[in-house]
Amino acid sequence: MGVLLPMMYASLFLLASVALASHDPDGSWAHPGSTLEGCPTSCGNLSVEYPFGIGSRCSRGPDFNLTCNNTTQPPRLFLRDGINEVLNDLAVGVYFDKLFITSFQHTIHMKPGQHVYYSSFKPPGRSFGYIGNTALNITGCDLDVYWVNDNARTITWACKTVCPDQRITETVARHHSKGVGCCRFDVYGPENGAFHLKFVQGHNKINNSTGSKSNRTAALWDRISITDDSGVAISWQIVDQPNCVAAMRDRTAYACVSRHSGCYDTGEGYICICNDGYAGNPFIPDGCSNDKGYNPIPSRTDCTRRCGNITVEFPFGIEEGCFAREEFHLNCTNTTSAVLLLDDFEVTGMNIEKGIFEYNGHTSAQVEHISGGRILFVGYELFSSLQWVVANLSCLEAQLNISGYACVSINSRCVGVNATTDYSFFEAPKEDTYVGYHCKCTDGFKGNPYIQNGCRDINECLQPNICKGKCHNIEGSFYCTECPHSTEYDLDKMECRTTKQHILLSGIIIGLSAGFGILALSFSKTCLIRRWNRNIQRQLQKNYFRKNQGLLLETLISSDECANDKAKIFSLEELEKATDNFDRARIIGSGGHGMVYKGILSDQRVVAIKRPKVIEQAEITQFINEVAILSQINHRNIVKLFGCCLETEVPLLVYEYISCGSLSQVLYADSSNGFSLSWDGYLRIAMETAGALSYLHSAASVSIFHRDVKSSNILIDEDYTAKVSDFGASRLVPMDQTHIVTNVQGTFGYLDPEYFHTRQFNGKSDVYSFGVVLVELLLWMKPIFTSESGTIQNLSSYFLKEFSEGGIIGIVNSQVLEEASEEEINNVASLAVACLRLRGEERPTMKQVEVKLQILRSKRMKLCQVDARNGEQTQSMLLTRRARVARRSSTMPLGDRDNVASTDNQ
């Protein structure tokens, strides 16, 4: 068993491959219907499936012909060019995206008297293509490396190598990779499947300290080595025909030969996948088969059904013979202090009837468990749960095979399960895909539908106020009868009571009320007016509550059984107490979407209470749905929405309070106050912000576009953790749409130009705004600023102009220039340029931006760990200490602050 992400290769940072052009070798290629007997199916620990093959008669064509080098241990698998080494199994029937990972190394041998060299890089065959970006390592001496763009007819300087020590080795050069014998750069989006490099070697210089030219290391001076950074993602497709329609005309060469398989266009060719409910290899006859792996009868009756405090019910089990299929075999570390595992997922709770279990493990846009190409577990709700199916069959198919049908309880039924899949590589929209079926008890019954007599009758009469009379339970249902003559139903005691008692009780209540009414007449006129005003206010609050769809929100909250932390509907009285009747001294911020107050709830939680601007009545229902969704978001880098108050004309929102202000305040604060963050801190905040936006775009149950990403909406808590805030302009995106059409909203300087012109907002518009934030972190300049000549300039335009002219180092803030390496600055600047592209389709996704920043920070953290082991105190540590001093001194009288600062500096 294995729990994998459905888009496993999307979490790898997008790389590229290199291959030399070659002629198709002679050979007789295997056709879809021909026999493949005797063909190797593995090379070392890697498996190979047709249309790939080891040997010409075992593959579909020259592009898919592989070579297995058995002289190494373990054996190594190569593509047709003999350069690209395959690093993962070539299993063709698991994913819609056809991807695999390779690694390569290419060498250019240098000639005496020649100083300019060229190298072209392209996929190893028409069937293959790059996925995303390429990271290249160049090893050699005294080189200037240029990236040649044939389409734009431009040559861009990429990096430079020098060898001050003539005897430096290739191993040492690659280890440092900072221009000394080796340099590294990213190639963004190779166009037309290829890109080109130019190498210029300068005049050889003799280092007096190292001796003559003969002391040079030949490996660095006599050749240029080009390698990938950590693996290359390559897509593949069938390209002997341009699309499925053309391919089906020639059935002798048509690739999708298995029954129950389908053909899908890719733009330049086509691919084959098994139909819903089937799995296997669609490229061979009868390669796609349906699911027959479920056994509804356990072979043992003495199964252990407890693992710690968790009950493990059938069809799952922790012992052989106790589960219905191998994929439902769970691992219990011991039966007392339970850790119940499904591979690397720790199961924390199970609900057999609903078909879900809670887990601690990976969190992503979708979680799938795949075995032999079968998807049995899919992400559910906010992805802290997995929903499972017993087999990849429709209910009709399952019921035809009664011996393998899972719903064995008398009062059970079959339920089909759909999962949302995103075939992003082929730019197809998200769609609901049928996964399989599971079982539920019919209405009026509850229990385990997978065992005999597992569904038991529910006694509905135990539920309060189910009848306005006498309740009678029957199997699977109930019915009500009126109370006998001279009795009435008592809602409090849930029984019929005699009318006399009721009249007596009513008389007592009326008498007491009249007495209190007479006493109330003795109060002053002022008290009566106040009470009257309060009643009017309460009635007004009730009217606002109904007008603002309070009943709808209550229904949404109560119907969400899977929400771990439900939103709360606060009363106006609670929020007035929390803010001292909305005292102006409690105002902590104001902006384009409303006023924000600091408040303290009765449970001592400190919150931020926001009064949005007027919401149109037509938008109230959408507002309520957004509150229900946003309140369930539980991400460490997103400000938590606790709930709202609907008893005012404009609903109030209650958020988590963040104490240390915004990223904008830290960037542009007066330097004299000593509060600052290190470059490492800013890089971490950028990474966390990108992760939060990526979560909103693709990992939440409904995609959410923020629409107002800027540095003032990125808050920083007391642990210097980023918190994305202010969802006043945010919009939910229906699952069948990729963008929304709205009136233009946002902040000038951060606004996506494409959105401004088309009024169509999508996730790439948030990417553009985040790109402006990255530029702010590099330059420490506001998005709209006044130049030295007195003209008002746009920061993104100014940055792109300087970047294109190669002057980025000259405009970077001095502190960033001091703390960050030139490579880090160039990497972040290149990422910002990619985010600021005018056409949204050319920008990276927020997930890609997050992965890039994770890689940059990981490398920086490794460097800091090396410095720490050498006994050096890193600049990041010093700046963090400096920030702590500033925070302490900001709470003291002005006269004491210098003493604190001087004490900490000693």
Image (cartoon, grey):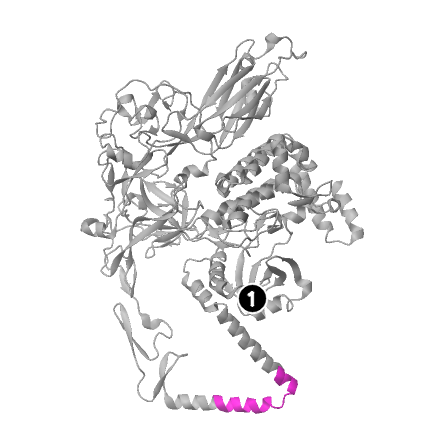
**Magenta segment, prevailing SS (helix, strand or loop):** helix
Instruction: Estimate the x, y position of residue 817 in percent, counting from the top left.
Output: 67, 34
Residues drawn in magenta: 509-529
Residue drawn at the location 34% of the way across and 33% of the way down: 269
User: Is 46 situated above or below 552?
Assistant: above
Instruction: Estimate the x, y position of residue 791 in percent, counting from the top left.
Output: 70, 43
Residue type highlighted by circle 1: Val
Magenta span includes 526: yes
User: Is 574 situated above or below 856?
Assistant: below
Q: Secondary structure at mark 1?
A: loop
Magenta span includes 343: no
Residue drawn at the location 32% of the way across and 73% of the way down: 461
Badge 1 local density, few (<14 within 10 Å), some, or many (20+)?
some
Quadrant assignment for the C terminus: top right
Tell me the residue that label 1 is attached to: 650
Residue 662 visible in rendering:
yes
Quadrant assignment for the N terminus: top left
In the visual, does 419 lie left or right of 746? Answer: left
